[in-house]
Image: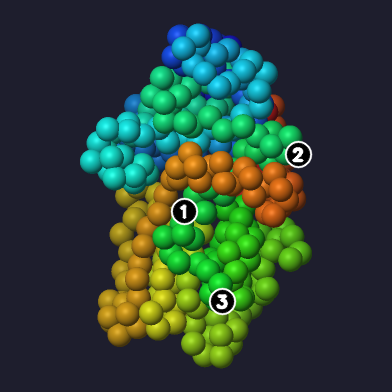
């Protein structure tokens, strides 16, 4: 099969690799869409301490079941499915307490397990047992279904950050995941959603209705906008949906008393030290949280929200690329030329 293999940092090549075969307790999926995540871009440019190269990246995967092992019940060849990328062991301390995203021995598609920038992907036995295969609702395209992974991560982030009825939410970053956060916050009952962005291309691409207020922070100071929108209180929840130290530093000033701040976007390795004003944390009694990844049940929840049209995803798809043009797809995503870049192997 053809696959885009990250051979070294910054070296991504499409080449022939062995096509996976399903054993009795595994499943092979024909990849129809795999979206590019900001994490993919960071791994491509900087590597990752948990990835041994060469490796096939890609973890926002949707496709059709190609082969089902004889010992795997409940799935059929040709079924349309999306994959929840994190495979928990099911046996460690955290798994036994139901906190699968904390699994001490987890592996993930596109990290330790070959990912979705390939014609086929193998769901190993542990993945089948962990329930990472979710059926795609008939109303969704494969490209839309690939958004279930980032939406599932947003679901978990907003759950741990307490976004709910009446919350005032500030989202920093108008990329695809920032827009998903805005739409999810509205669904979760937020009374006001304020989106902050400085990149002019991103600002032009924000679909109407994505937030109650979109602030160009080149023209208006972010703290002023957050305070003006909340009668001087500041936000209940601030979600940093971009990968910059400045945004993380700024988030403390945007939160109100007792506010919650979620560092959703990871920083590049070697550039992750951030200076925070601890007096703001102390006197405002702020809670700063990180979140990453999601569970198979949250992935299924995301597919349901997208499938029923409660959260729209179609207008977040910027452009699709064939596997042979994956270099162009990565450049498109890096340069923020559009919204979500999707690879179609």
Q: What residue lies at 38% left-to-right and 24% top-to-bottom? A: 126
In the image, is 157 to the left or to the right of 102?
right
Locate the C terminus and report the quarter of the image it occupies: top right
In the image, is 306 to the left or to the right of 269?
right
Mark with earlier residue (3, 2): 2
Label 2 to label 1: alpha-carbon separation = 24 Å
Q: Secondary structure at mark 2?
A: loop
Q: Secondary structure at mark 3?
A: loop
Q: Quadrant of residue 259?
A: bottom left
When the figure is inspected, residue 284 is found, relative to residue 203, above or below; the finding is below
Label 3 to label 2: alpha-carbon separation = 31 Å
* Residue underneath mark 1: 156
* Residue underneath mark 3: 166
Q: What residue lies at 42% left-to-right and 68% top-to-bottom? A: 261
Q: What residue lies at 32% left-to-right and 33% top-to-bottom? A: 90
Colour scheme of the rendered structure: rainbow
Q: Secondary structure at mark 1?
A: helix
Q: What residue lies at 61% left-to-right and 55% top-to-bottom? A: 180
Locate the N terminus and report the quarter of the image it occupies: top right
Q: Nearer the viewer, residue 329 or 312?
A: 312
Mark with earlier residue (2, 1): 2
Q: Quadrant of residue 195?
A: bottom right
Kindly indicate whether the residue at mark 2 contacts the one at mark 3 (C-beta within 8 angstroms). Answer: no
When the figure is inspected, residue 271 is found, relative to residue 18, above or below; the finding is below
Q: Nearer the viewer, residue 324 or 128?
A: 128
Q: Position of residue 22 (x, y in %)?
A: 50, 11
Q: Position of residue 330 (x, y in %)?
A: 59, 38
Q: Report the disc number at residue 43.
A: none
* Residue underneath mark 2: 139
In the image, is 113 to the left or to the right of 21?
left
């Amino acid at each position: 099969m053809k696959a885009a293999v990250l051979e070294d940092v910054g070296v991504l090549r499409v080449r022939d690799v062995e096509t996976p075969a399903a054993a009795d307790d595994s499943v092979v999926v024909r990849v129809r869409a795999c979206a590019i995540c900001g994490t993919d871009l960071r791994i491509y440019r900087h590597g990752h301490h948990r990835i041994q190269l060469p490796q096939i990246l890609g973890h926002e995967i949707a496709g059709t079941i190609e082969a089902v092992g004889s010992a795997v019940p409940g799935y059929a060849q040709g079924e349309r499915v999306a994959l929840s990328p994190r495979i928990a062991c099911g046996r460690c301390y955290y798994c036994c307490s139901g906190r699968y995203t904390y699994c001490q021995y987890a592996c993930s598609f596109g990290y330790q397990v070959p990912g979705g920038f390939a014609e086929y992907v193998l769901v190993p036995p542990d993945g089948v047992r962990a329930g990472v295969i979710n059926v795609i609702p008939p109303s969704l395209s494969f490209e839309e279904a690939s958004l279930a992974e980032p939406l599932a991560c947003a679901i978990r982030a907003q759950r741990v950050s307490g976004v709910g009825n009446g919350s005032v939410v500030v989202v920093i970053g108008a990329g695809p995941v920032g827009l998903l956060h805005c739409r999810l916050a509205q669904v979760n009952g937020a009374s006001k959603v304020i989106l902050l962005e400085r990149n002019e291309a991103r600002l032009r691409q924000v679909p109407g209705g994505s937030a109650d207020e979109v602030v160009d922070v080149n023209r208006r100071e972010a703290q002023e906008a957050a305070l003006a929108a909340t009668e001087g209180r500041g936000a209940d929840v601030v979600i940093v949906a971009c990968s910059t130290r400045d945004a993380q530093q700024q988030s403390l000033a945007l939160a109100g008393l007792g506010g919650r701040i979620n560092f959703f976007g990871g920083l590049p390795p070697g550039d992750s030290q951030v200076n925070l004003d601890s007096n703001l944390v102390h006197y405002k009694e702020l809670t700063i949280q990180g979140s990453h990844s999601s569970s198979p049940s949250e992935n299924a929840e995301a597919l349901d929200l997208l499938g029923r049209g409660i959260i729209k995803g179609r207008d977040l798809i910027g452009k699709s690329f064939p596997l042979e043009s994956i270099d162009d797809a990565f450049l498109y995503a890096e340069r923020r030329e559009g919204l979500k870049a999707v690879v179609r192997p």
